[in-house]
């Protein structure tokens, strides 16, 4: 108990330091996704969308790329305050200390396995820190929202799309 | 398909898209109305009909049936606040609110209920609103029901609604059918993305065109920033033009002057505008007691296809669980169903990876039930509070206390039992650690033990109410029973922020009726004509 409590406080402190750093990096407000952010989001999408993505590596990479494009579009439609928060979260996850300490992922995103990433997602999902839990929620909604917004994902779930006709 | 909005624009309606302004403007009218939803629309119609010159201010864009493509990817960013992902301060509640001409009436699911009599009784006793009762308001509801074609829906419910009906009947839980504000509805199921056939009698196709036909001026993509006031009266409102994205300021300002100002920006936007303006609030009532009808969700897999994306979205409800205890006792809840589309369902379903994908593959077999918790009556249910962030934009803090979780658990149990009674083979609350259950016995045990906490149990809201509550005295509210501000003589509030509690019913008709009354009283006062004969 005391150990997990210590870790909890440590993660909380590290989190606030890293968040202020990320806040500073993102002081200019909303902007395009950086290459590092795209790489991180691709790795997370590749894990979250397991079961929905095809197994063929090349097809999978293309669809993950489209999902990351969709996330960028969705973020641009959020309020400025929410864009800033999401920018801080992404900024935090792409710096090595953030990835290691808060996400617990040792390797760069491109090299991390789906099992490692899944462990990180599960840890945030069930975290006692509201900040990490809500960050998991944001990633969940952005990734699934971007995936199922595209009509080419509908056939697999049996959704015929909106009615066609005399509109 | 005739698009009445495009036809009206071609016919010379005065619409100014503030995103296109090349320089600042000053404009003068008899009345400025901030917001074009249920409150702003009805007000514009009634005041313009009395011969008053009105100007409407809308933060969102003007979109109409030609734009409504029934695709979530287009509809949410264009028609909803914050692309349908507006959240409370701790991110634990997702709020669905319209942001376009017509406000939430452009995207709601057409459910129409009068304010229940017991709600008026509570307001009379607790807030001194003796003028308002089911009897005194009856004619105003009737007027609006007639105007907006609110009546029984005779078509059979879709399978998603039918599940609530079947489960309820099996368990002896009374269910009833929902009245809808539609005329010639095609039963498509896409009300939430803007009606593509103009059947829904939203403000977009009724009151606002009526006002524009009488010469009213409509500004869109214009955010009301600050009221100017002096000597107990509002003199002007300063507005800020937004870029076409509806998010970034465009740099141009519009200054609107009038004899009277009506605020109808919804229960988050209206208190925020008054807070930004620093209007007198000596008893600190402004922005307090904001209610949400917090909603918890139960999904089920049915043996047959449900196709919950198709057909009128909400046609069956049950108020059984609103009547199990006194109104100020443990929170009651109303049962309804939501339409399901891929983005809405996939973001609401818990989990990720194969487990999530497996459920999504059963998309056509999913039934979902909603429980709307009736907040604001129990003394421990005091709602949330609207405040401002560093940029002056609204933030709603809504702590979810034990009285809410207590009701949430009863609601999740009731919904699971109904779904199994309707034949479900699997049921799960929208909850991060619910494993899903294969029988009612399993669900009963599992849900009883579920930890109910923010961000673990999914909570959403589509009904924001309160924050500028009505009362008989400024110690208890922000405005009187006519929506008139207690401190600024020519300022009215005409939207869902008026309600001193939640309603226990979908709010649109409550807003239409109350605003029809108050706008008629205001029209008489401003035009010097006789007051309306109905009370």
Image (cartoon, coloured by chain):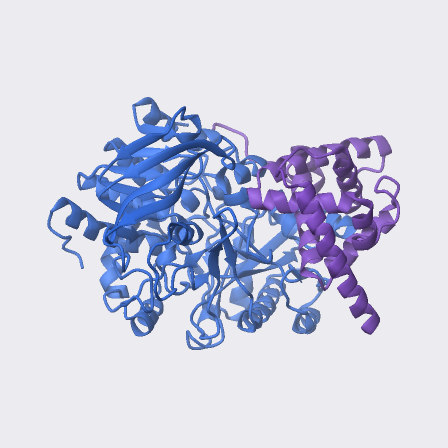
Q: Is residue A160 visible?
A: no
Q: Which chain is blue?
A: B
In the image, residue B219 lies at what x, y percent? 36, 34
From the viewer's perspective, is residue B104 above or below residue B402? above
Picture quarter with the N terminus of chain A: bottom right
Q: Nearer the viewer, residue B520 or B20?
A: B20
Q: Residue at x 67, y 33 (%)?
A: A32
Q: Quadrant of residue B457?
A: bottom right
Q: Is residue B394 visible?
A: yes
Give left or right: position of B18 versus B137: right
Q: Quadrant of residue B503?
A: bottom left
Q: Residue at x 37, y 45 (%)?
A: B226
Q: Quadrant of residue B48?
A: top left
In the image, residue B529 lies at what x, y percent? 11, 47
From the viewer's perspective, is residue B170 above or below residue B532? below
Q: Residue at x 26, y 50 (%)?
A: B230
In the image, residue B179 lies at what x, y percent? 38, 53
Instruction: Name chain A's colour.
Output: purple
Q: Nearer the viewer, residue B15 or A3?
A: A3
Give left or right: position of B327 versus B348: left
In the image, residue B37 lies at what x, y percent? 38, 45
């Amino acid at each position: 108990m005391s150990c997990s409590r210590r870790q909890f406080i440590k993660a909380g402190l590290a989190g606030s330091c890293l968040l202020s750093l990320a806040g500073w990096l993102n002081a200019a407000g909303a902007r395009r996704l950086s290459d590092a952010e795209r790489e991180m989001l691709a790795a997370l999408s590749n894990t979250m969308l397991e079961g929905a993505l095809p197994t063929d590596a090349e097809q999978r990479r293309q669809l993950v790329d489209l999902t990351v494009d969709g996330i960028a579009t969705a973020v641009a439609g959020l309020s400025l305050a929410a864009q800033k928060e999401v920018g801080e979260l992404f900024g935090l996850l792409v710096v090595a200390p953030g990835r290691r300490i808060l996400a617990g992922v040792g390797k760069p995103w491109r090299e991390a396995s789906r099992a490692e990433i899944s462990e990180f997602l599960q840890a945030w999902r069930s975290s006692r820190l509201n900040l990490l839990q809500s960050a998991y929620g944001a990633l969940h909604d952005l990734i699934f929202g971007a995936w199922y917004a595209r009509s080419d994902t509908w056939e697999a779930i049996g959704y015929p799309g909106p009615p066609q006709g005399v509109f | 398909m005739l698009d009445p909005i495009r036809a009206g624009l071609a016919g010379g309606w005065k619409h100014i898209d503030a995103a296109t302004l090349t320089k600042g403007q000053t404009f003068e009218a008899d009345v400025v109305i901030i917001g074009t939803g249920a409150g702003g629309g009805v007000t514009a119609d009634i005041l313009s009909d009395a011969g008053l010159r009105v100007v409407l201010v809308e933060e969102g864009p003007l979109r109409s049936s030609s734009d409504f493509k029934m695709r979530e990817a287009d509809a949410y960013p264009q028609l909803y606040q914050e692309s349908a992902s507006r959240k409370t301060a701790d991110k634990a509640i997702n709020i669905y609110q319209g942001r376009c001409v017509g406000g939430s009436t452009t995207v709601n699911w057409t459910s129409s209920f009068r304010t229940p009599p017991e709600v008026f009784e509570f307001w009379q006793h607790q807030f001194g609103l003796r003028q308002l009762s089911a009897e005194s308001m009856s004619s105003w509801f009737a007027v609006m029901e007639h105007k907006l074609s609110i009546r029984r829906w005779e078509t059979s419910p879709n399978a998603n609604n039918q599940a609530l009906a079947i489960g309820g009947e099996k368990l002896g839980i009374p269910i009833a059918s929902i009245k809808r504000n539609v005329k010639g509805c095609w039963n498509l199921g896409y009300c939430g993305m803007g009606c593509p056939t103009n059947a829904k009698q939203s403000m977009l196709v009724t009151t606002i065109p009526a006002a524009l036909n009488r010469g009213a001026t409509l500004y869109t993509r214009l955010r009301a920033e600050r009221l100017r006031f002096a000597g107990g009266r509002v003199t002007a409102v300063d507005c800020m033009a937004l870029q076409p994205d509806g998010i970034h300021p465009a740099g141009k300002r519009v200054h609107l002057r009038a004899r009277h100002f009506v605020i109808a920006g919804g229960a988050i936007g209206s208190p925020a505008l008054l807070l930004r303006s620093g209007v007198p609030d000596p008893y600190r009532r402004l922005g307090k007691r904001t209610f949400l009808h917090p909603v918890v969700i139960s999904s089920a897999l049915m043996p047959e296809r449900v196709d919950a994306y198709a057909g009128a979205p909400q046609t069956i409800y049950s108020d059984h669980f609103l009547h199990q205890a006194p109104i100020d006792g443990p929170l009651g809840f109303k049962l309804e169903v939501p339409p399901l589309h891929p983005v809405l369902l996939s973001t609401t379903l818990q989990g990720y990876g194969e487990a999530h994908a497996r459920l999504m593959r059963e998309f056509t077999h999913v039934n979902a039930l909603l429980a709307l918790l009736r907040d604001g009556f129990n003394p421990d249910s005091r709602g949330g509070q609207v405040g401002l962030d560093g940029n002056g934009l609204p933030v709603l803090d809504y702590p979810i206390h034990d009285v809410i979780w207590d009701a949430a658990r009863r609601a999740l149990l009731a919904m699971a039992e109904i779904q199994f009674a309707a034949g479900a083979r699997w049921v799960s609350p929208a909850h991060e650690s619910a494993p899903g259950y294969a029988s009612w016995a399993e669900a009963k045990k599992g849900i009883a033990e579920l930890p109910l906490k923010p961000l673990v149990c999914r909570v959403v809201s589509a009904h924001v109410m309160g924050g500028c509550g009505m009362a008989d005295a400024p110690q208890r509210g922000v405005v009187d029973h006519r929506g008139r501000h207690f401190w600024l003589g020519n300022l009215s509030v005409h939207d869902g922020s008026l309600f001193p509690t939640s309603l226990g019913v979908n709010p649109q008709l409550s807003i239409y009726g109350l605003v029809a009354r108050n706008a008629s009283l205001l029209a008489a006062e401003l035009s010097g004509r006789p007051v309306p004969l109905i009370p």
